[in-house]
Image: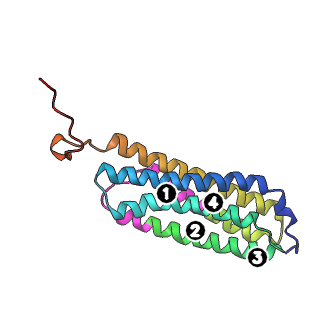
Amino acid sequence: MPDTAAPLAAWDSFYVVVGSSAAALTGLQFVVITLIADARRRGGPAEVAAFGSPTVVHFCAALLMSALLSAPWPSLRGVHIALLIVGIAGVCYTLLVLRRARRQRGYQPVLEDWLWHTVLPLVAYAGVLAGAAMMGHGIAVALFAIAGASLLLLFIGIHNAWDTVIFVAIEQPAHSPAERTPAETPPAPRA
């Protein structure tokens, strides 16, 4: 493995954009989850663990990789090991998400859900793992693989957050008048 981290310098701007986007979108996902909780819709912790939490994890993984690849490493060895850990952890986490999605009962996933919540994240984390493994053999190809995986995680998070918002806004039934709290009840018209 090369002893210099100079190849990473060319990627600084890329990872500033990806990392900033991931950080902002992580915060936005917290807003989405808060709105869902306020909407008092069906679903519970099992559905959040299967479909909500992974979105935050993917954004945070993209942010973490951006930080790792922007850090002033004295050699590529440290970033190589860190990215191997991220890739392995991501693959394991995706398999956990698959198990959670199969076990929850509040929502019946369709093919698109399986693709965006399990298949594509598995591809992304495998890409991180492959890119990290290649770092000692071809740094340019490795860095492109890791960059592609970072972008894929960002796009997965964007898609899944949007999908959640659309599901809550359109698919879920609205509150009936009997379910409204006094603050939600419109005032009676004046005579």
Sequence-first tag of 4 and 3: 4
Disc 1 + disc 4, Cβ < 8 Å: no
Q: Evaluate whether residue 115 shows in this view.
A: no
Tag 3, which secondary structure? Answer: helix
What's the residue at 70%, 51% (across, down)?
A: 17
Report how far apart the C-alphas of labels 1 and 2 lie in the structure.
12 Å
Tag 4, which secondary structure? Answer: helix
Name above or below for residue 3 compared with residue 11. below
What's the residue at 16%, 27% (across, down)?
A: 189
Tag 2, which secondary structure? Answer: helix
What type is the residue that disc 1 sits on? His
Report how far apart the C-alphas of labels 1 and 4 lie in the structure.
16 Å
What's the residue at 36%, 51% (across, down)?
A: 36
- Position of residue 128 measured from the top left corner of the image (x, y, whole percent): 67, 65
Disc number lying in front (1 or 4): 4
Coloration of the structure image:
rainbow
Sequence-first tag of 3 and 2: 3
Report how far apart the C-alphas of labels 1 and 3 lie in the structure.
30 Å
Residue stretch in magenta? 99-124
What type is the residue that disc 2 sits on? Gly
Horizontally, residue 37 falls left or right of residue 113, namely left
Q: Which residue in the structure is indicated by mark 4?
A: 62
Q: Nearer the viewer, residue 28 or 75?
A: 28
